[in-house]
Amino acid sequence: MTRTTPHTRLTVTRAEHLDIDGRRPSQERGTRRVELILDAAAALIGEVGVEGLTVQLLAERAETSKGSLYHFFPDVAAVLRALGERHFRAISATVVDITNDPSLDWPRMPARNVVAALLAPLDYLERNCDLLALVRAPGVLPRSSRSMQPMLDLVDFVLAARFPSMAPERRATRSAMLVAMIDGVVGTAARGCSRNGREMRQELEELLASYLISLSTTVSY
């Protein structure tokens, strides 16, 4: 339990204060407004691209004023960074959910089921095509938001659980290899948002399943 200090008590008191007009806590209203702005940015990126995004377009799509938008973000670049961080947190949460799921029997799961779990973050990317544009745009996202580390962590976890006798250095190399396969196909197929994306996704699944099966028959790990 978090220890309550005078400062935290003050914060709670302020958060519970009701606005006269909306009768909702001001912090909650602010959070909702930020999410609406980020949702608007994600939608607009799909329509006008990262370069075409402006404060005017954001304000109109989020149904807010420019002044309100500037209250939360100093410029469009800050909106894009916040959108990237939101995506990164969502993908990281997906990875945590998978690795903490006690029902998944990694050593005995069919290879195709393992691949489906490994590609769960890719499913998220296919539902959020704006993330690819953010990653590809030079100088938009900080390194932390472009990191493949959550994917590396997931693959390393799965290989360790499925092949417990595999040497750590070999596992690290193979994890990097699997992530490189995924990242290469994702970049080429535009994460399912281009014409041949679905076909390439199917080929990727076949490739990863074959690779996992080959590992299971390897004598020396």
Image (tube, rainbow, N blue to C red):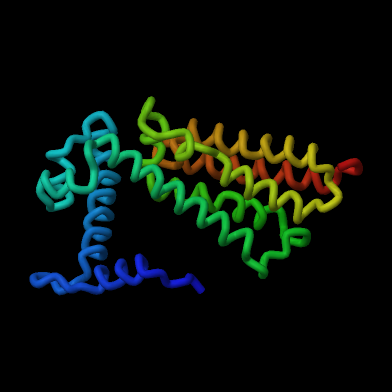
Image vertical order of residue 15 relative to residue 77, above or below: below
Residue shown at 55% from the left, 39% from the top = 148
Residue 136 on image: x %, y %: 41, 30
Write down the quadrant of residue 145 in the picture: top left
In the shown orientation, is residue 113 left or right of residue 27? right
Residue shown at 48% from the left, 38% from the top = 144
Residue 51 on image: x %, y %: 26, 29
Residue 30 on image: x %, y %: 23, 59
Residue shown at 74% from the left, 46% from the top = 212
Name the foreground residue: 57 vs 46.
Answer: 57
Residue 196 on image: x %, y %: 45, 36
In the shown orientation, is residue 1 left or right of residue 49? right
**Image quadrant containing the C terminus:** top right
Residue shown at 40% from the left, 45% from the top = 85
Count of numbered circles in the view: 0
Q: Residue furthest front?
A: 6
Q: Residue furthest right?
A: 219
Image vertical order of residue 180 relative to residue 160, above or below: above
Write down the quadrant of residue 141 in the picture: top left
Image vertical order of residue 51 relative to residue 63, above or below: above
